[in-house]
């Protein structure tokens, strides 16, 4: 199943399946260094060790708590900088061992651990046992993005816990805006778009947009409406590696975007829309 965004080296009018970064989906063993914040292990920076997977590197973060997206975004950006400088994956991760980021991002340990796979590291980070202790768990559960998006669509004043999460997301999205024009994929329901959708229709998105880095011709079969959205350079965005091998990565786009419909194709069982995001002001 395709998760909820782009890959040719030529970004112009193309779809990109990967942003410039290390391969992040090794199937074999990995070596990892823990990221700690206030004594709590929030994430692992890892690199592959076998054969072709030696070019793999990435970050595994806890799903609960407030480390994502700002804390995880810091380490992902540090990896991406090293990739851009041509540093091999293992050296890139080793260079981050023993370093510290801003308070919200924590610091990397100096020693490495070995795991059989990414899944094993995930299990160590987030034990599945129902009675597993939750260290540093906040008293109030951090709002899910669905709750945040619903509040943004509703308009009006935001509850303090929602407003805090919105500020953190906005800050993380500003770290690395889209470097060049890209095309991403949105999976939508029919009732989430105007019924009279035609060329030239303008749509305002008050909430964040989670998009797939899927190929230009990929049409998720379970989607009622598939939107191929052209995104210009400079749009605040946050890239996330694929959670499973074979799935596309995702690109979370800023809230408050406006886009214009370029074409509507009514296919059997599915509507395909192409659109263009208005350039950032």
Image (tube, rainbow, N blue to C red):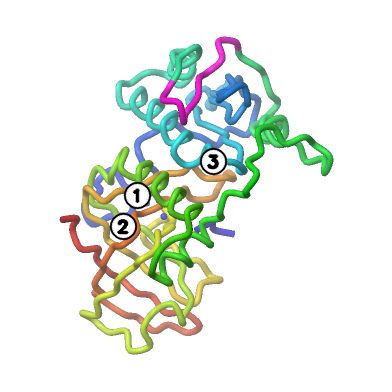
**Cα gap from disc 2 to disc 1, whole angstroms:** 7 Å
The first of marks 2 and 1 along the sequence is 1
Residue 107 is one of the magenta-drawn residues: yes
Q: Quadrant of residue 267?
A: bottom left
SS type, badge 1: loop
Q: Is residue 246 left or right of residue 218?
A: right
Residue 239, image x, y percentages: 41, 44
Asked if marks 3 and 1 touch (Cβ < 8 Å), the reply is no
User: Looking at the image, do the residues carrying marks 2 and 3 touch, with CB atoms under 8 Å apart?
Assistant: no
Image vertical order of residue 192 relative to residue 243, above or below: below
| Image position of 212 with respect to 172: above or below | below
Q: Position of residue 98 (x, y in %)?
A: 50, 11
Main SS of residues in magenta: loop
The quadrant in which the C terminus is found is: bottom left
SS for callout 3: loop
Mark seen at residue 66: 3
**Quadrant where the image shows the N terminus:** bottom right
Magenta segment, which residues?
101-111
The answer to whether residue 209 is seen in the rendering is yes
Q: Which mark is residue 16?
A: 1
The percent position of residue 136, horizontal first and vertical second, equals 65, 33
Label drawn at residue 183: 2
Task: Name the residue at 46% across, 21% down.
Answer: 89
């Amino acid at each position: 199943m395709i998760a909820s965004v782009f890959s040719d080296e030529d970004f112009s009018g193309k779809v990109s399946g990967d942003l410039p970064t290390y391969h992040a989906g090794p199937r074999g063993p990995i070596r990892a260094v823990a990221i700690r914040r206030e004594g709590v292990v929030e994430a692992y920076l890892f690199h592959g060790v076998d054969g072709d997977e030696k070019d793999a590197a990435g970050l595994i973060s806890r799903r609960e708590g407030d480390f994502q997206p700002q804390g995880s975004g810091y380490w992902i950006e540090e990896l991406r900088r090293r990739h851009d400088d041509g540093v091999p994956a293992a050296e890139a991760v080793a260079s981050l061992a023993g370093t510290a980021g801003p308070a919200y991002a924590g610091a990397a340990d100096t020693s490495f651990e070995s795991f059989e796979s990414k899944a094993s590291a995930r299990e160590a980070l987030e034990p599945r046992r129902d009675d597993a202790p939750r260290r540093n768990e906040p008293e109030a559960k951090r709002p899910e993005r669905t709750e945040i998006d619903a509040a943004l669509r509703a308009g009006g004043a935001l509850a303090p816990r929602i407003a805090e999460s919105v500020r953190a997301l906005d800050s993380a999205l500003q770290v690395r805006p889209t470097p060049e024009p890209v095309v991403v994929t949105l999976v939508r329901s029919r009732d989430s778009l105007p019924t009279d959708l035609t060329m030239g229709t303008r749509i305002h998105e008050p909430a964040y947009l989670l998009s797939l880095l899927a190929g230009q011709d990929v049409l998720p079969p379970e989607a009622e409406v598939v939107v191929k959205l052209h995104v210009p350079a400079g749009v605040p965005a946050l890239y996330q590696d694929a959670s499973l091998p074979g799935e596309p990565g995702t690109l979370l786009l800023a809230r408050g975007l406006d886009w214009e419909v370029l074409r509507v194709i009514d296919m059997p069982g599915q509507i395909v829309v192409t659109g263009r995001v208005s350039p950032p002001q």
